Amino acid sequence: MVDKPPPPTPTASVLHDAALRHLARYATTQTGLLRVLDRRIMRWARAVTPDDEAISAGKAAARAEIVRLANAGLLDDAAFAATRAQSLSRAGKSRRGIAAHLAIRGVASAVAQDALPDDPDVELAAAIALARRRRVGPFGAAPLDPAQKLRALGSFARAGFSQDMAQRALGMDRVEAEAVLHRVRAL
């Protein structure tokens, strides 16, 4: 087995190139990109066993690169949050689920709150999308018996929907549910 050469020393230019390559492939937040660069630094550190000062210098260079890219407009947490919130909402995620997803991605709570959809019809459409995916309520083959309805309500609750919203989505007929989905997607 041939030994792989160690990764390059994480200088500012190496980290800049790595950050640009990552941004070219993935939408991310400042925190997300910092995690990527930190992992790169730690991979380098495991390969060459440097002193703590070199690791600290690499991490400082990574933080400086994040600031530089944010100032250049290449990293915009608000735009990331708005785009991701819209995408997740259309996929059937609740406001709570979207907020949790954005928090995991490192979006500040104030920025995440601004990105969350305020329209109750959007939340209802997300619940309907979940019902369609789970094939319950208006999209089920047959009406739900009490045990099945309780199980469906549980899945809505785990997805972050309120009981009222889940019952509204489950109680609609198919034509009305499709109309809500169409109306919200046209926005």
Image: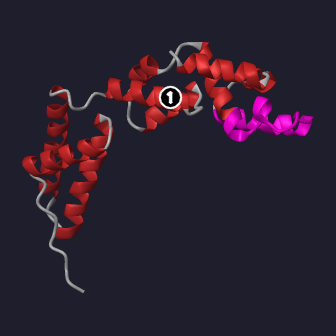
Residue drawn 74% across the image and 21% down it: 175
| Magenta span: chief secondary structure | helix
| Picture colour scheme | secondary structure
| Location of the N terminus (image quadrant) | bottom left
Task: State the residue in front, 107 or 142.
Answer: 142
**Quadrant of residue 147 within the rendered picture:** top right
- Up/down of 128 relative to 1, above or below: above
* Residue 115 in sight here: yes
On screen, residue 81 versus residue 44, left or right, reads: right
Q: Is residue 23 left or right of residue 148?
A: left
Label 1 sits on residue: 99
Closer-to-camera residue (177/57):
177
Front position in the image: 53 or 90: 90
Does the magenta portion include 7?
Answer: no
Q: Circle 1 — which element?
A: helix
Q: Position of residue 82 (x, y in %)?
A: 40, 24
- Residue 32, given in percent of the width and then of the height, sits at 33, 41
Residue most toward the top?
A: 119
- Residue farthest along the bottom direction in this orientation: 1
**Residue flagged by tag 1: what amino acid is it?**
Ala
Query: Is there any visible trace of residue 164 in the rendered image?
Result: no
Q: Which residues are magenta?
A: 131-159
Q: Would you say residue 151 sits in the magenta stretch?
A: yes
**Residue that appears at 24% across and 55% down:** 40
User: Can you name the residue that lies furthest to the right here?
Assistant: 145
Residue at the spot 48% in from the left edge and 35% down from the top edge: 101
